[in-house]
Image (spheres, grey):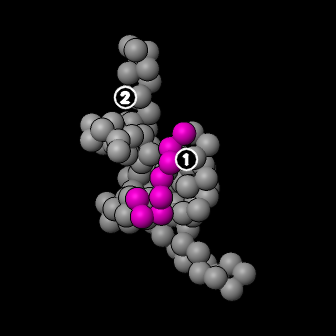
Amino acid sequence: MQDPILRKLFLGFIQIHILHHAKKEPIFGSFMIDELKSHGYDISPGTLYPILHNLEKSEVLTMESKNVEGKVRKYYSITPKGEEILAQAKDKARELTHEL
């Protein structure tokens, strides 16, 4: 089991990853799980989808359902508010990285 402090920190990093990728192009859950896995995060759908829903509820992401090969897939895109938050998070991450 992961230390609660590390879990909280990593959840913040995961949200930054989500916003970063949603700015590049609309994202969907399984893509983000694979992308996060490539960065060493082992995240389950049961953890990711509540994060996506909370980001949508906070108006930093919008969601659009699309029919893909007969299945409904939810795509998430960044909002202007999300872009502002991402820019601030990137500035803070650069500052911290430089300090470390």
Residue where numbered disc 1 is placed:
36
**Amino acid type, residue under disc 2 in the picture:** Lys
Look at the image and tell me in which quarter the N terminus lies: top left
Report, in whole angstroms, how far the alpha carbon at label 1 lies from the one at label 2. Answer: 21 Å
Of residues 94 and 71, which is closer to you in this image? 71
Q: Main secondary structure of the magenta part?
A: loop
Is 45 colored magenta in this rendering? Answer: yes
Q: Please give the name of the residue rendered at 38% of the width and 21% of the height, measured from the top-left corner.
A: 96
Q: Earlier in the sequence, mark 1 or mark 2?
A: 1
Left or right of 49, for residue 66:
right
* Type of the residue with mark 1: Leu
Give how far across and how far down residue 47 sits, in percent.
40, 59
* Closer to the camera in the image, 99 or 89: 99
Residue most toward the left? Answer: 4
Nearer to us of marks 1 and 2 is: 1
**Which residue in the rendered view is the most extreme toward the top?**
99
Q: Which residue is mark 2?
A: 92
Could you tell me residue 70's position as x and y percent?
68, 86
At x 38% / y 13%, what residue is drawn? 99
Q: Residue at x 44, y 33 (%)?
A: 90
Magenta region, residue range: 40-47
